[in-house]
Image (cartoon, rainbow, N blue to C red):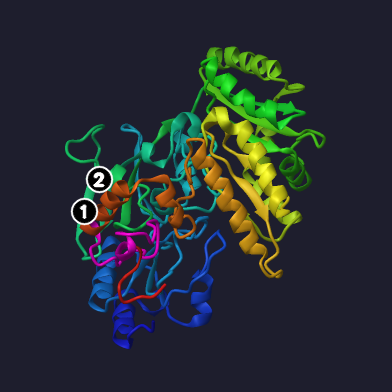
Amino acid sequence: MAIDSAALAAMESRLGKNAVLSQASDRKLYEYDGGVDKSMPDVVVFPRTTEDVVALVKLAREYSLPIVGRGAGTGLSGGAIARAGGVMISFARMNRILEIDIENERALVQPGVVNLDISLAVQPFGYFYAPDPSSQRACTIGGNVAENAGGPHTLAYGVTTNHVVSLEAVLPDGTVIQGGGAEIDGPGYDLTGFLTGSEGTMALVTKIGVRLMRQPEAVKTLLAIYNSTDQAGSTVGALTAKGIIPIALEMLDGPMLRMVEAATHAGYPLDAAAVLLIEVEGVTESVEEQAPAIAAVCEACGAREVRVAKSAEERELLWKGRKNAFGAIGRVSPTYYVQDGVVPRTMIAPTLRAIGDIGKKYDIAISNVFHAGDGNMHPILPFDPRRPGDLERAQKAGEEILDFCISVGGSITGEHGVGMEKMELMSRLFPGETLEVIKRLKAVFDPQCALNPGKMLPTGRGCLEIRQRPDVVL
């Protein structure tokens, strides 16, 4: 749809001409995220304050324009794509840390603050912000809240919702609401928890209060090396059975670790079938006890070797390999499709076998790097967009992988969100009665379906009007 010239003029008057992009060449940079889908917004705007956001949503309401909030665009499920066109509100310029309250272990930030910048800001005080997605050097807190992002260290610390203590948000009619606060457990409904993970379909978050964690006294990182993915997978359940919960437990299979090693030279063994990257932290005495106990479990499950990082530099290099895994794939394939299913820890080994079988069925060389500790699988499916049908083949394989995850008691997403990628799978995961309740909740916050239309809910009976605005054909 074309944006009314009067609406553009009003946006420029409010924000300034340099904060409103309406030319196609400028908007094209905002038609995609980290996934595989594309759709171009009709205008991109850059507010700096909550008041700017209020003015923008009121303008959008006046001119019947859909609204999509956007952080850094690193998401992997199409959540920040303007599927129905309209106004894209980029929070890139709302990027200030408003307050650091070390005494109460809190910080107040705008949604455009980069995840890692919070930890860097509080590091001199001996604190850090725990959720650490692989894209933490680029992704923003607003996007993390929208998707309820996780990361390697959330095995022990939890995901974003466990570290958000308050939210300020703007509803599609311009109403500003508050959720949470400085107190540990406030009265009433948990609006903060409800909005976290709602993928921009309920409100636009404009301020976020986050919990800060004290830096640990000691940290040890171990690399367990296996000749079999089954052995590596079984180790995860074995550690849990022994009552050992590391703060991070990551797995890379052979194809993935070889790509990572070629790119980062992190010290991963090229001949291994899989490795587990395991980290423990806490008081020195506890860490010194846990590390050999973990090594013993790994060896009992078939690890041929367990290495302990001997220095902070060696530890950082191992993590550099893990965090840069997605970038390393570019050495083998220029494009890839990544999935985000979840399975019980005890089903990791069978799931890896199923992923291998699906890869053979579709003739796709699938590699795996994932959060083994909480069963959050990330199979990587390379494809060539220049070959007709190649992307569709990868998507079919990905759907079969998610179907398998559901069949063993898992889920279709652990941290990437549903977006437009997995919305049709929601009806396989939830019964119709549950989807109906979700529909009603959506209608309470956004009765006109102005916010992020075409996301999260399937097109089945009773959900069509939530999937899209009645005047927009998707």
Farthest bottom residue in view: 5
The residue located at (21%, 56%) in the rendering is 444
Residue type, label 1: Ile
277 vs 198, left or right, is right
Q: Could you tell me residue 57's position as x and y percent?
A: 27, 69
Q: Which residue is mark 2?
A: 191
Q: Quadrant of the N terminus?
A: bottom left
Asked if the magenta segment contains residue 166, the reply would be: no
Residue range corresponding to the magenta coloring: 445-466
Farthest right residue in view: 271
Q: Disc 2 to disc 1, how far (Cα)?
A: 9 Å
158 vs 206, left or right, is right
Rendered position, 235 above or below 16: above
Mark yes or no: residue 404 visible.
yes
Mark before the other along the chain sequence, 2 or 1? 1
Q: Which residue is mark 1?
A: 177
The residue located at (26%, 75%) in the rendering is 59
**Rendered image quadrant of residue 393:** bottom right
202 vs 37, left or right, is left
Q: Could you tell me residue 147's position as x and y percent?
A: 42, 50
Rendered position, 1 above or below 307: below
Residue type, label 2: Leu
